[in-house]
Image (spheres, rainbow, N blue to C red):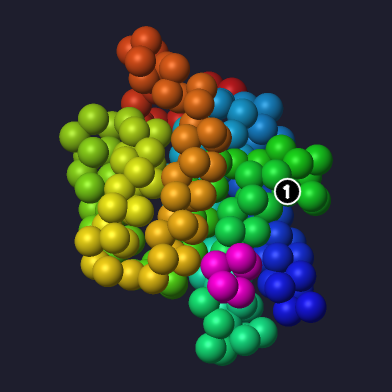
Amino acid sequence: MNYVLAVVIGYLIGSISFSFIWGRLFQGIDIRKHGSGNAGATNTLRVMGVGPALTVLALDIAKGVLAVWVGWWLDPVSLLLPILAGFAAIVGHNWPVFFAFRGGKGIATMIGVVATLCFVPGLVAGLVGIASIVVTRFVSLGSLLFAALLPVSLWAFGREPELIVFSLALAALAFYRHRSNIVKLAQGKENKLSFRRSNR
């Protein structure tokens, strides 16, 4: 029963789309109809600016943290429950039940989950991703590097097999959600990070 609760609660937490809510409350728009059409922090930056983007980023990360803690609350000694709750939150962010299953790409929520479950290995993979974004200004590339390097980092730090399997699933999900970005990167057509708001 706890496993079902972990997945359901994690998914519902993840389904709260803060970029959509911010757009509706403060801009009167559906973020999914502007910019890249993605309900996440990067598109929030593109469409609504730095302040809203940072707020959405923080809240999306918090979703992942909260979901993991729900898993630990259900069973303080379990590793599988927080993993399941965290993964469900990422799925909820990507396909939110409250918003017609049209969400984001899950990286910010993934950061929250990973930081809570395995901070140091996640930090190592994350720093590589951040460095890539700084150098190339491609958020998608940095996100993919973070996801791809996480299993390697976990293995290098000798972490639990469950976490390594979990990280492989996260990497697969991240690459699936970024498949259009991968095509654009290959074609040289991917948008670079910019702090200027685009025209809607």
Question: Residue 28 sits in which quadrant?
Answer: top right
The quarter in which the N terminus is drawn is: bottom right
Q: Is residue 84 magenta?
A: yes
Instruction: Provide the residue designation for mark 1.
Output: 96
Query: Which stretch is magenta?
Result: 80-85
Q: Could you tell whether 88 is left or right of 40 in the image? A: right
Residue 53, percent across and down?
48, 47
- At a point 56% along the width and 78% down the height, the residue shown is 69
Q: Is residue 48 above or below residue 54?
A: above
Q: Is residue 35 above or below residue 153?
A: above
- At a point 76% along the width and 41% down the height, the residue shown is 101
Residue 189, percent across and down?
39, 13
Give the SS element for disc 1.
loop
Q: Could you tell whether 138 is left or right of 4 in the image? A: left
Specify the principal SS of the magenta part.
helix
> Can the viewer see residue 29 in this picture?
no
> Can the viewer see residue 11 in this picture?
yes
Q: Residues within 10 Å of mark 1 (few under 14, many from 20)?
A: many
Residue 57, percent across and down?
48, 54
